[in-house]
Amino acid sequence: MKKKLLILSALFLFVVVTLFSQGSSIDETFWTKLNPVFSGSQYVMDRETCISCHSLETTAYEHTKHSRIFKLNPKTKLEKVDCEACHGPRSAHIENPDKRFAITDDQYSLVCEQCHKGGDRMYWSNSLHKSANVNCVTCHSVMEKKSSTALLSKKTELELCSTCHTDVTSKAMRMSSHPIKEGKMECSSCHNVHGAPGTGSLTKATSNETCYTCHQEKRGPFIWEHAPVREDCKTCHDPHGSNNKSMLVTQNASLCVSCHQYGGHINQYRYNRVSTPYGNGCVNCHTTIHGSNHPSGVKFTR
């Protein structure tokens, strides 16, 4: 038993060390695999040599997070090679400075993954953004500080996401929406832009689980459950914004009537005067529409 515990402890330690050492060492074959022209080129490890030709680029770079870490507090072997951590071994380039060593934007994503992999980036290879030919340098600015958050290529996350997702960000400007335009939430509050196991690049496996991170009171379990609520919040709500109250996909009473159409109940506009475009309609009586724990709450009236 002792021996088994010792083996398991050693295995656990190996896994931990492996995970935390990602990006800490230099893979000598990485750049050659990326572009055969790097074969035989060595690391110079001298920022001043790079600056002698690339002073214009490095002037802006000096104010970035990467520059400060690589120059002032490098902790890994890769960080200690400074500029060449991202641009590859440059001895051959110094001898013959041409464009042979240029790599594509898509290849730069692999360069970034030398350090930035695992965690919330573990699904990047199968992510929606990667499938759409979006890469790291599409959204992040490494050589110039343009944002105080996550090296973004735009000042704010909303501004960045808006460059592609205009249909979604326009909804955020509607009458009823999450406080994104006020800066109290970000797109990444609900979405993992680097990929996710579920749909829509959500931070959780389902849309309901994502919503429950803030709206815990809607989770339940309830004695009386409203089926659409249990199945998907998006059945009734548009999470990106709506011109209806509470981000509803349509007006209150219209939404209820889309499922609850039967005789013997005043559930139509011509009978229900409180079902106005801006009134509460059905929920004037059915107040606990997300679910009820009251013994007599079968109709969600209490």
Image (cartoon, helix red, strand yellow):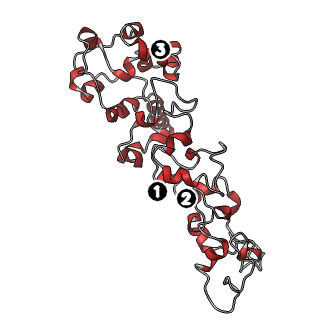
Whether 197 is drawn above or below 54: the answer is: below
**Label 2, label 3: how far apart the Cα atoms are:** 44 Å
Q: Which mark is residue 207?
A: 2
Asked if one can make out residue 82 in the rendered structure from this viewpoint, the answer is no
* Residues marked 3 and 1 touching at CB (< 8 Å): no
Residue tagged by mark 1?
199
Mark 1 Cα shell of 10 Å, populated few (<14), some (14-19), many (≥20): some
Would you identify the image quadrant in which residue 300 lies?
A: bottom right
**Label 2, label 1: how far apart the Cα atoms are:** 8 Å
Would you identify the image quadrant in which residue 25 lies?
A: top left
Q: Nearer the viewer, residue 20 or 101?
A: 101
- Circle 2 — which element? helix
- Circle 3 — which element? helix
Q: What residue type is labelled 3?
A: Thr
Q: Which amino acid does label 1 sit on?
A: Thr
* Residues marked 2 and 1 touching at CB (< 8 Å): yes
Whether 20 is drawn above or below 129: the answer is: above
Mark 2 Cα shell of 10 Å, populated few (<14), some (14-19), many (≥20): many
- Circle 1 — which element? helix
Q: Nearer the viewer, residue 288 or 58?
A: 58
| Earlier residue among tags 2 and 1 | 1
Q: Which mark is residue 59?
A: 3
Q: Position of residue 112 (x, y in %)?
A: 40, 30
